[in-house]
Image (cartoon, rainbow, N blue to C red):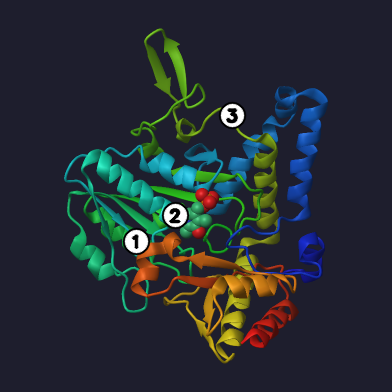
Amino acid sequence: MLDMAGLRADTPGCENHVFLDSAGSSLPPRAVVDATIAHLRREAEIGGYRAANERIDDLYAVKTAIGELINADPAALALSDSASRSWSDFFYSVPLAPGDRILISGAEYGSNAIAALQRSRQTGAVVEAIPSDSSGQLDLDALSAMMDERVKLVSLVHVPTNGGLVNPVAEATRIAHRSGALVLLDACQSAGQLPLDVAALNVDALSATGRKWLRGPRGTGFLYVRPELALSLEPGRLDQHSAEWTAPDDYVLSPDAGRFEFWEYSVAARLGLGAAVRYLLDLGPAAVYAAIAERAEYLRKALSEIPGVDVRDRGIQHAGIVSFTLDGLEPVRVRDRLAAESITVTVSHRSSTLLDMSARELNSVVRASPHCFVSFEDLDRFAGAVRALG
Ligand SMILES: *Cc1c(COP(=O)(O)O)cnc(C)c1O
């Protein structure tokens, strides 16, 4: 069981504020803000290099903590400044030739789809979308039927940005691997809100962001790459951290996932990310995941009882994102009217998940995403405010 009073005391931002945007950019716990700011102050005292040297062990511990959370070796992790950076660092390193096929998810995230289209134009590979089944999740039979040896990469979205479904990643990965394709998992909306075990899921690579369910600072993200695979890939851009200049005409790549990292980064933000993951591990991820699921289910039920509200979530297994529309009021207006009452939700627009939203003829949906620090009183206040808008 989580200590709600402690959780809320650790989260100054949730006082007198119903915060429902952990799928966008969550409220960090005090420990994260403190770690980040303390480091910026230390840099101002002794300079960035000495300040970083003082924290060498803590900086390494960031990867240890993430590795513990997703069951990965720290050497299989590359830290970055966003999920999109990490996703594309991996994606652009996979060799593609004319006629190769890239499969993307029906709920693919916009940035990933744009990268896939760009590489298709550059290489002559083709991009195809895996259909969704009648429940809205990835259609495993359709995926099986699409697979052949020309499929080089399958991009799976664990939890889409625009709704609370959970895709069957382990099953889809098994199907993709039978034909020898690589599987890249976008875990941006699952890291920090669902159990993630790269060994159990057996994906080849995974990307996630720090600021969403992990409650880290903005400008943080990470990539996992299966160790043997990392050694066979050459990132599209290198620096003298991802590689070493060994002779006037030669260099060698870093011997692990570090080849996907540049030397320069925000040390303060990275220490903040480490504090965020450690905070989650200390709370107990299973208890946090259960609390998120319980709140999202509560919210779906409360919203579905309000006249004029359509809960738009699909899928069989549900995650912590609750999407809905309200008759007669545009989602951005719903968001703004709620903001005036100290209730934070956000809007997911068609272009973020173009295939899925177009198929459902939706331009945008309101997205409410409660983390474990949100109380049931908060949820009732939110539901009451939505009812009053209708
Ligand atoms: C937010 C999001 C991303 C992008 O994360 P950034 O850190 O902004 O790059 C990718 N995929 C999904 C599903 C997301 O929700």
Identify residue for label 3. 264
Task: Please say whether residue 308 is visible from this viewpoint.
Answer: yes
Quadrant location of residue 201?
bottom left
Distance between the Cα atoms at labels 3 and 2?
24 Å
2 and 1 marks in contact (CB < 8 Å): yes
Residue at point 20%, 39% (across, down): 97
Q: Amino acid at mark 2?
A: Asp
Task: Please say whether residue 188 is visible from this viewpoint.
Answer: no
Q: Viewed as shown, does residue 4 lie left or right of 357?
A: right
Which of the two labelled residues, at mark 3 and mark 1, occupies the earlier sequence position?
A: 1
Q: Is mark 2 within 8 Å of ligand 1?
A: yes
Q: Amino acid at mark 1?
A: Ser
Q: Residues within 10 Å of mark 2 (few under 14, many from 20)?
A: many
Identify residue for label 1. 105
In the image, residue 86 above or below residue 357: above
SS of the residue at dot 1?
loop
Identify residue for label 2. 186
In which quadrant of the rendered image does the C terminus lie? bottom right
Which of the two labelled residues, at mark 3 and mark 2, occupies the earlier sequence position?
A: 2
Q: At which x and y percent is residue 308?
A: 54, 89
Residue at point 62%, 53% (across, down): 211
Q: Viewed as shown, does residue 308 lie left or right of 204?
A: right
Distance between the Cα atoms at labels 3 and 1?
33 Å
